[in-house]
């Protein structure tokens, strides 16, 4: 028996595998596809995704393959400047194709010791009080204490659990592909800019390996979205939308996606969890899908590791759903709003114009940017300081940066009083007694995912928070 089986080897699954391995948890990732996909769906990392990579020591690898871009212009494609003084040390978007993100995250998980089995589809599961039995397509069975479905919106795990997936079906499909184009780059970009004034789902993005990632609205909704479009269909849609096919040729891959919006009714059934697209699907407006799934994995990883290693306090695993379900529900709602604002119909265009005027107010622009980038997320951890439940940005200390001290996946008490103690929890929580000019509270207890679990200076209140989030003291 292994500790955890993860169904699905995309970004969510790989981040979760790595988070578990930081705590010595035995992990097997089973991925249906024999080879990594060539399809470039996500185009980058938002602020919270960048912060998480930094917190685990991966950011330099990502920066080597990506390009920093301004934060403005992501909400429904409305072009505005990035707000100043955002609550982050990484006030940018990192443009990087998902294929590279997938590779870097897989390498990270493998380096930490995760076992990855490709060409290995999960077809069935049963569970009891002691664990989960997974049935694979080749007829073999695997046994684990826990199982997590990270197998996408059409994945198997959610269906096997019988978890409802309410929401709306796709009303508008988009064709996606990678191909070369004969039209000179300057002319191509000028035409694309002109078309995108009204068609926000259209675009050409240069790829590192040459050619372009091309997106164009489809003609209707496909009965089976797993069937890729033909290249002739792609060219016809380019002509219909842009008046030219741009001389495209030599397609490397073709795909399609819809704007369906759904969320799982439950994120946990017994010993089985759902994360990433298996728990929520939504249109790609604002580029949040990959980032949302990675944040799911960061939230669940340390909690599941605590259950495996035996120190999880009662109810800790249930906080995964209570914290992450509302976050995804909010993302679904504002992607719905963005899709309406991207419509070419007169009514939505009028509302879009009004919102563009409102975004000239810094408060409005900041609010929407914080939504897209997840800076505004605050888990409901009860009454207290405004920092409670929020992620603490990377602050500078005498011994280096905060995120450099959190790479092991442990909790951390950042103590400016020098009078507090984590005795009894030192196997799970680091104590850094140091003053930072960037920190305005006496002390803050951070969970392994970087969210503040307690703020204050009273030792008894600290002990209560340590017990709540990190279990019983070893001294008890």
Image (cartoon, rainbow, N blue to C red):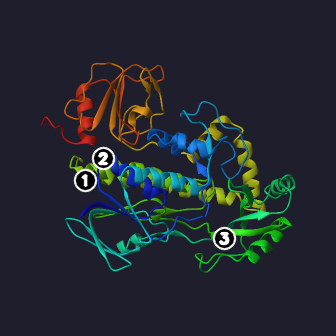
Q: Quadrant of the C terminus?
A: top left
Left or right, residue 8 beside residue 204: left
- Which of the pair 86/28 is nearer the observer? 28
Please report contact status of discs 1 and 2: CB closer than 8 Å, yes or no.
yes
Residue position marked by numbered label 3 in the rendering: 254
Q: CA distance from mark 1 to mark 3?
A: 41 Å
- Which of disc 2 and disc 1 is earlier in sequence? 2
Q: Earlier in the sequence, mark 1 or mark 3?
A: 3
Image disc number at residue 23: 2
Q: CA gap, disc 2 to disc 3?
A: 40 Å
Expressed as whole percent of the image width and height from the top left, the position of residue 72 reads 68, 42
Q: Residues within 10 Å of mark 2 (few under 14, many from 20)?
A: many
Q: Earlier in the sequence, mark 2 or mark 3?
A: 2
Label 1 belongs to which residue?
308
Left or right: 347 as drawn, with respect to 319: right
Q: Secondary structure at mark 3?
A: strand
Circles 2 and 3: CB atoms closer than 8 Å = no
């Amino acid at each position: 028996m292994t500790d955890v089986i993860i169904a699905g080897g995309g970004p969510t699954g790989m981040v979760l595998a790595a988070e578990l391995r930081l705590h010595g948890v035995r992990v097997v990732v089973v991925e249906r596809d024999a080879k990594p996909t060539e399809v470039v769906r996500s185009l980058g990392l938002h602020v919270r995704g960048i912060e998480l990579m930094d917190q685990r020591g991966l950011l330099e690898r990502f920066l080597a393959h990506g390009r920093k871009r301004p934060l403005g212009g992501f909400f429904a494609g409305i072009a505005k400047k990035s707000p100043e003084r955002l609550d982050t040390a990484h006030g940018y978007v990192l443009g990087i194709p998902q294929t590279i993100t997938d590779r870097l995250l897989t390498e990270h998980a493998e380096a930490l010791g995760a076992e990855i089995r490709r060409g290995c589809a999960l077809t069935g599961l049963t569970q009891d009080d002691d664990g989960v039995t997974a049935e694979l397509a080749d007829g073999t069975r695997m046994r684990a204490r826990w199982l997590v479905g990270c197998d996408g919106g059409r994945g198997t795990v959610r269906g096997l659990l019988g978890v409802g997936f309410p929401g709306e079906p796709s009303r508008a499909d988009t064709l996606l592909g990678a191909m070369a184009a004969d039209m000179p780059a300057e002319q191509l970009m000028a035409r694309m800019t002109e078309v995108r004034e009204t068609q926000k789902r259209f675009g050409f993005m240069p790829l590192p390996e040459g050619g372009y990632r091309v997106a164009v609205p489809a003609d209707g909704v496909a009965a089976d979205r797993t069937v890729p479009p033909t290249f002739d269909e792609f060219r016809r849609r380019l002509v219909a939308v842009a008046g030219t096919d741009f001389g495209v040729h030599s397609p490397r891959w073709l795909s399609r996606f819809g704007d369906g919006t759904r969320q799982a009714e439950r994120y946990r059934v017994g010993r089985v969890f759902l994360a990433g697209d298996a728990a929520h699907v939504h249109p790609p407006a604002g580029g949040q899908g990959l980032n949302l799934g990675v944040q799911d994995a960061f939230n669940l990883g340390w909690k599941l590791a605590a259950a495996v290693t035996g120190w999880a306090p009662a109810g800790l695993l249930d906080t995964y759903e209570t914290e992450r379900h509302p976050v995804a529900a909010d993302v679904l709602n504002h992607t719905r709003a963005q899709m309406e604002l991207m419509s070419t119909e007169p009514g939505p265009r009028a509302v879009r114009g009004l919102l563009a005027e409102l975004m000239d107010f810094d408060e409005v622009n900041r609010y929407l940017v914080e939504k897209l980038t997840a800076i505004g997320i605050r888990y409901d951890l009860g009454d207290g300081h405004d920092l409670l439940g929020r992620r603490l940005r990377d602050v500078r200390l005498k011994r280096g940066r905060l995120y450099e001290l959190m790479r092991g996946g442990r909790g951390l008490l950042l103590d400016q009083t020098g009078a507090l103690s984590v005795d009894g929890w030192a196997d799970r929580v680091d104590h850094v007694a140091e003053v930072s000019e960037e920190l305005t509270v006496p002390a803050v207890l951070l969970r392994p995912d970087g969210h503040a679990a307690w703020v204050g200076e009273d030792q008894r209140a600290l002990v209560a928070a340590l017990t709540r989030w990190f279990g019983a003291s070893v001294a008890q």
